[in-house]
Image (cartoon, rainbow, N blue to C red):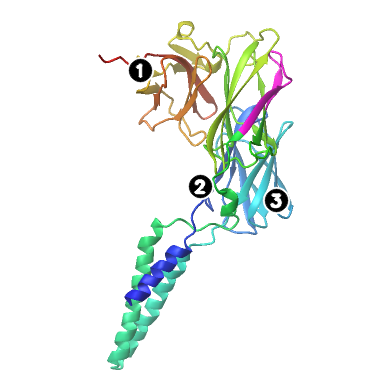
Amino acid sequence: MIRVLGLVVALVLLLATPAAAHNVMAGADLRIAQTIAGTELTVVVKGTTRVPGPLRIGVIAYQPVTALRVGLEVRSVEDGRTVKGVATAAARDPQYARLTVERTGPHELTLRAGNEVAVVPFRVLVDRGSPGDLLIYGGFFVAGLLLVGGLLTGAVARRGPAMLLAGGAAAGLTVATMVIVVEPQLPPATPDGAAPVAETTPAGGRPYVQGRMESLPARPDAGAEFTLRIDLVDGSTGRPVDDLTVHHEALTHLVVTSEDGRYFRHVHPLRTAPGRLEVRLRADRPGRYLAHAELEREGSGGQLIPGSFTVGGTPKADPADPAGKPTDPAGKPADPADQPAETVTDGRPVVVPRLRPEVPVAGRPVTIELDAPGDVRPWLGMTGHLLVRSQDGSFLGHVHEMGAPGGRLRFTFGFPAPGRYLAWTQYATADRIVTTPFTVDVTAPAVRR
């Protein structure tokens, strides 16, 4: 009996399939942020439990929109079968479009809003069940049959066979119980539709992405819309990189700032072709702008790709305020000397964050805290975001809120070196993304003698 139980446990361990990093679990929702049609949206692809079966897709708005309709098209990469639908963006409780998918595996979701188009790759996954489930339910079923048989056999005074059947029932219960205990410690089984392990994790891992940024036109005018394009290639083959993984609910996080920090945008470019990302922007003043793309490649790791571009022309009034006075806190000066301790946007006070210690020391953690309204909701999977840039633009840091109780947001950050840093906190409310800029002067550690 002991040998049989040992064999069962060994088979369970052998049948367990290692889980690939960043694979979306079968049945889980896929959320992808997109900056499209001049607003910040998150596309939600609800998990499906069967194929053929329904696939529900909704669009959540994080900035004010008026009846923004997003065209949807889902295409199977393997057989080309396509289904279409329409979703209307909403800040709360979006209406999900119901499409039908015929098979698992790689698909492409095409989004159309305004005159922009994005193509998002994803996989339809269906849980195939755990190998341990068969042993658990089978063990209980066999134990039940044997137990009933043992009771009936014992009733007619056949002691030997009854004991044998009871022993078999006990063995079945033991196997099922052992699997219940062991199974949570094992990697989940690979769902139907997942990429082959050899495809997702090649020997030695994939090399980092080589990125190139450019603005179209090459020197946009202040106040005019332009496109910032990022081309990604594999450094070893020169081919387009088209295997970015979703991290923090986006394929790419792009932070664009002016050199003086008065302009700040945290956006999520559209995939317009294999290895190509694009986002439309508008800068209201001429000068040099810095861009940092935060992305992660399957089987490689996270990385930060820097770039820059120049805006020409003459300063323009902020589109949000014809009088030229920005109403978005992100448009206000980053220097505290030019910015009051409390500003007001849309009737809401925005308080400059508090630092502990008040004078940060390089290489030591700093707590950054600010008050937030009660209607804060998660954005990009987090309650709040803190982005920090060195004054010369050579460093960019990005951390998330720690889960402070009450109406507060709290971050912990370690500044790498002495100097002045430009910083921005961000969080989402019921109808908008609130950005608060501030600066931090970091001192050097005291020298011990």
Q: Nearer the viewer, residue 183 or 33?
A: 183
Residue 343: numbered disc: none
Q: Nearer the viewer, residue 433 or 265?
A: 265
* Horizontal side, residue 102 vs residue 17: left or right: right
* Residue underneath mark 2: 21
- From the image, which quarter does the C terminus lie in? top left
Q: CA distance from mark 3 to mark 2?
A: 22 Å
| Rendered image quadrant of residue 417 | top left
* Horizontal side, residue 426 vs residue 195: left or right: left
* Residue underneath mark 3: 77
SS at mark 3 in the image: loop
* Residue underneath mark 1: 361
Q: CA distance from mark 1 to mark 2?
A: 36 Å
Q: Earlier in the sequence, mark 3 or mark 1?
A: 3
Q: Is residue 125 magenta?
A: no
Q: Position of residue 423 (x, y in %)?
A: 47, 19
Q: Position of residue 364 (x, y in %)?
A: 35, 23
| Rendered image quadrant of residue 163 | bottom left
Q: CA distance from mark 3 to mark 1?
A: 52 Å
Tell me, yes or no, if residue 330 can be seen here.
Answer: yes
- Few, some or many residues within 10 Å of mark 2 (<14, 14–19, 20+): few
Asked whether the residues under the numbered discs 1 and 2 touch, taking CB atoms below 8 Å apart as contact, a structural biologist would say: no
Between label 3 and label 1, give the one nearer the viewer.
1
Give the main secondary structure, helix, strand or loop, of the magenta stretch. Answer: strand
Magenta-drawn segment: 210-229
Q: Position of residue 438 (x, y in %)?
A: 46, 15
Q: Is residue 219 magenta?
A: yes
